[in-house]
Image (spheres, helix red, strand yellow):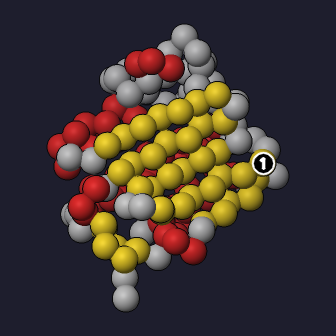
Amino acid sequence: MIEQSIIDHSHLLDGKPVEVLVNDNCNTSVYAQPGMLKVLLDNLLSNAFQYTDLGEVTISFINEQLTIADTGPGIDQDISTNVTEPAVKGSQSTGYGFGLSIVKRLCEHQGWLLTVVSDKGTTISVSFADSALPTS
């Protein structure tokens, strides 16, 4: 699913010197509805791709936690505390400001923990707790 989401949003990286790194530890299973995971991945990866003009986007899965980190400019400081609320968007946003609020609601509904850290770049993590099991 990660690979498909990367392909679906790769046009956002056209002409940008950005490397997408998918760690081997992403070869895992998460027990959830595929549509929910697709919405989560699409929102998080499209944001990372849209806002990263140079550097890299790294996707990893460690200790039942998906992490997507980018080397973009980070989230505007004036909205950083409420960036997961509906209709909140940064000055560089071309969307409507609902992507992260959708991710937040999805995580709350599933009992997943969403963490957003933004300084130089942005790191978003989703902890699946007991929902993830490694593939064998």
Quadrant in which the C terminus is drawn: bottom left
Which residue occupies 60% across, 47% down?
69
Measured along the vertical axis of the image, is residue 117 above or below residue 130? Answer: above
Q: Horizontal and vertical percent for residue 42?
A: 44, 52
Q: Is residue 127 visible?
A: yes
Q: Quadrant of residue 34?
A: bottom left
What's the amino acid at mark 1?
Gly
Residue 87 location, x and y as percent?
Answer: 38, 21
Q: Residue furthest bottom?
A: 136
Q: Residue at x 57, y 74 (%)?
A: 24
Q: Which residue, given by chain and number where applicable, does mark 1 sit on?
A: 55
Q: Which quadrant is home to the N terminus?
A: bottom left
Q: Position of residue 13 (x, y in %)?
A: 69, 52
Instruction: Note whether residue 106 is visible.
Output: no
Which is nearer the eye, 89 or 130? 130
Residue at x 49% of width, y 70% of height: 26
* Viewer-nearest residue: 9 or 120: 120
